[in-house]
Image (cartoon, rainbow, N blue to C red):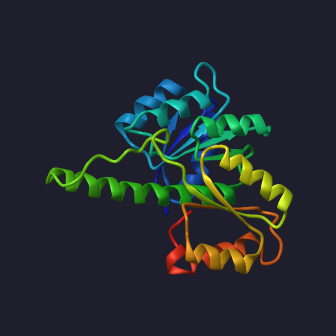
Amino acid sequence: MPGQVLIVDDLATSVKVLAAKLTSEYYDVMPAHDGAQVLDIIRSTEPDLVLLDVMMPGMDGFEVCRQIKSDPATRHVPVILLTALNGVRDRVNGLTAGSDDFLSKPVNDTMLFARADSLIRIKRVVDQIKLHQETLRSFGMAADLDWSADGAAGGRVTVVDTSDIYGGNLKKTIEDEGHEVTLLTGAEETAARIAEDPGDLAVLNLDYEGRGPLGVVSMLRSNQATRHPR
């Protein structure tokens, strides 16, 4: 799933290291070294993915990400924040800024390529939807889509966790954000329930017992009804 990746870091060495890794996997890379440069590039040449360092002088990665995601023309471009920070608050700040993922330095190559492929695949689906909408709009047949997170209605979320305590806490946290949440604790129950009603999002605990989270994901992806929901 190679694509065009914008690498952003004020340290030229860090950019070169990431560029070498991605180029070896046939990605097309573009370098940037500060926030203002990123915003100029992303508006003129829409990349498939932005790898954005958090700790930069002037405009930090959180603010750059926030500006990318607040612009209707660029908010669908996926952003992965790269940082040596590992605190919960830092990750919350990243998610609040609108980042699509968070990788810790030094970046694991396998994790990097897997996350990049996944996010680029999603962006290409969005690109196809946008193209379809533009084509319909040119014939006067469609209204504009609202891509803003702020305008989105509450979704239906399935939480999968064998722990009633941890799963219950996560359920409450998501419900507090205005979403409808169902807590499931068994692998077979999960597959059957989501096959019956996919909802909008499934959240699986990585410490899930039994078949494990990958087993549950495999079951969901093998079912036509649940292949596309996230």
Q: Residue 77's x, y, as percent?
A: 46, 45
| Occupied quadrant, residue 194 | bottom right
Residue occupying the point 68% across, 60% down: 110
Location of the C terminus by quadrant is bottom right
Residue occupying the point 49% across, 38% down: 150
Residue 2 in sight: no
Of all residues, the one furthest to the left in this rendering is 139
In the drawing, does residue 86 fall left or right of residue 28? right
Residue 175 in sight: yes
Q: Residue 188's x, y, as percent?
A: 72, 80
| Occupied quadrant, residue 99 | top right
Of all residues, the one furthest to the top in this rendering is 58
Q: Nearer the viewer, residue 94 or 3?
A: 94
Q: Nearer the viewer, residue 88 or 54?
A: 88
Q: Nearer the viewer, residue 144 or 23?
A: 144
Q: Residue 121's x, y, as percent?
A: 48, 60
Residue occupying the point 65% across, 77% down: 191
Instruction: Tell me: residue 163, above or below residue 133.
Output: below
Instruction: Tell me: residue 108, above or below residue 220.
Output: above
Instruction: Tell me: residue 219, above or below residue 32.
Output: below
In the drawing, does residue 193 fall left or right of residue 138? right
| Occupied quadrant, residue 126 | bottom left
Residue occupying the point 55% across, 34% down: 65
